[in-house]
């Protein structure tokens, strides 16, 4: 078995993704390799999407998802679009079915290059999100940050989109909040036994939202697809919008949008948006030592 595998540096709306090809081998990208890759400014990332041989019938691949702190994630919307683009370029196929620890995902690349991912059904049960306390209604849970009588953020909608999310509704520009300060406190709040992705969402019309996310295991990122899906579902669930919205991802570079539909007929959430290939190379999945295509040397960590 070769020590190194192919990887591609990609992004989904600026969400930094490394797509690592682990097909044909039994090992996994290690947390140590993830941490080493993230420590290097050239390969720092938000998520690794490791493509493995399929484990279930009628699936094309098993996808293992790692955050930049080396922890595992159950879902990654922007990363899934990157995987689709990479596999579509390799195979000429347009439609794929993936398995993740959270379940089966179907995805398709459209003629215009955008990619739709069926992210599955949202989960609202408090113990499946999971939350530490029982809430009959998770669309508005008791949680706040800031002065007790004048909280900066409060009463988020909580849900799972395969991974845990808390959506805080705000009236002001999402960029005006100190999310770098509040994000880690909320991600690690005792309310979230498996930590949570923390999103600020501003409703801008019955069909649009602006979001900004502090990601579990990755911190402030330029975009988060599963958070955009969670904000869209939570907005519709609480009567703030309809079931089809455009998400303006506030920190995406360049500014960009995702289209999200929470389908009435089967409860599934469909996310549509772009993916971008940047460059490729080879990486040792156990150590994170890597080289860029066209160069000879393994880069120092
Ligand atoms: N950027 C991702 C979300 C990645 C997973 C998240 N940090 C977690 O631990 O749940 C996306 O686009 O969905």
Image (cartoon, rainbow, N blue to C red):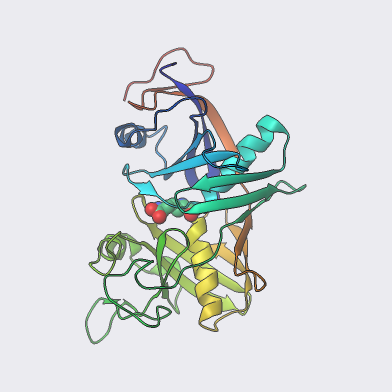
Left or right, 259 with reference to 92? left
- The spot of residue 31 in percent (x, y) is 31, 37
Residue farthest bottom in this picture: 149
Residue farthest right in this picture: 111
- The spot of residue 90 in percent (x, y) is 66, 30
> Can residue 282 be seen by looking at this rendering?
yes
> Can residue 253 be seen by looking at this rendering?
no
Left or right, 236 with reference to 108? left
Residue nearest the observer in this picture, 82 or 98: 98
Residue farthest top in this picture: 296
Q: Quadrant of the N terminus?
A: top left
Q: Quadrant of the C terminus?
A: top left
Number of disc labels: 0
Residue farthest front in this picture: 57
Choose top left, top right, bottom left or bottom right for residue 95.
top right
Q: Is residue 225 above or below residue 17?
A: below
Left or right, 45 with reference to 57? left
Choose top left, top right, bottom left or bottom right for residue 197.
bottom left
Residue drawn at the location 40% of the way across and 78% of the way down? 138
Residue drawn at the location 60% of the way across and 72% of the way down? 208
Residue drawn at the location 29% of the way across and 65% of the way down? 192
Residue nearest the observer in this picture, 177 or 2: 2
Choose top left, top right, bottom left or bottom right for residue 40.
top left
Residue drawn at the location 60% of the way across and 78% of the way down? 205
Q: Is residue 39 above or below residue 155?
A: above
Residue nearest the observer in this picture, 77 or 10: 77
Q: Is residue 297 above or below residue 74?
A: above
- The spot of residue 103 in percent (x, y) is 50, 53
């Amino acid at each position: 078995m070769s020590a190194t595998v192919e990887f591609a540096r990609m992004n989904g709306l600026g969400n930094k993704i490394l797509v690592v090809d682990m097909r044909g081998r039994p090992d996994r990208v290690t947390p140590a390799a993830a941490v080493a890759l993230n420590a290097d400014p050239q390969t720092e990332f938000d998520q690794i999407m490791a493509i493995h041989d399929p484990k279930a019938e009628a699936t094309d691949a098993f996808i293992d998802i790692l955050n930049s702190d080396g922890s595992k994630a159950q879902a990654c919307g922007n990363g899934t679009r990157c995987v689709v683009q990479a596999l579509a370029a390799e195979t000429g196929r347009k439609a794929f079915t993936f398995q993740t620890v959270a379940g089966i995902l179907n995805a398709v690349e459209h003629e215009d290059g955008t990619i739709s991912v069926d992210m599955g059904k949202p989960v609202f049960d408090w113990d499946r999100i999971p939350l530490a306390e029982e809430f009959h209604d998770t669309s508005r849970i008791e949680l706040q940050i800031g002065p007790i009588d004048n909280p900066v953020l409060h009463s988020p909608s909580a849900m799972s989109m395969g991974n845990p999310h808390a959506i805080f509704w705000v009236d002001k520009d999402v960029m005006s909040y100190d999310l770098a300060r509040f994000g880690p406190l909320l991600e690690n709040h005792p309310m979230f036994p498996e930590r949570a992705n923390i999103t600020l969402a501003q409703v801008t019309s019955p069909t649009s939202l602006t979001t900004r996310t502090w990601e579990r295991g990755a911190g402030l990122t330029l975009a988060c697809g599963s958070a955009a899906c969670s904000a869209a579902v939570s907005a519709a669930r609480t009567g703030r919008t309809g079931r089809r919205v455009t998400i303006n991802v506030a920190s995406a570079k360049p500014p960009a949008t995702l289209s999200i539909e929470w389908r009435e007929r089967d409860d599934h959430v469909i996310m549509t948006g772009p993916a971008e290939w940047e460059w490729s190379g080879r990486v040792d999945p156990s150590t994170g030592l890597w080289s860029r295509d066209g160069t000879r040397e393994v880069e120092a960590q």
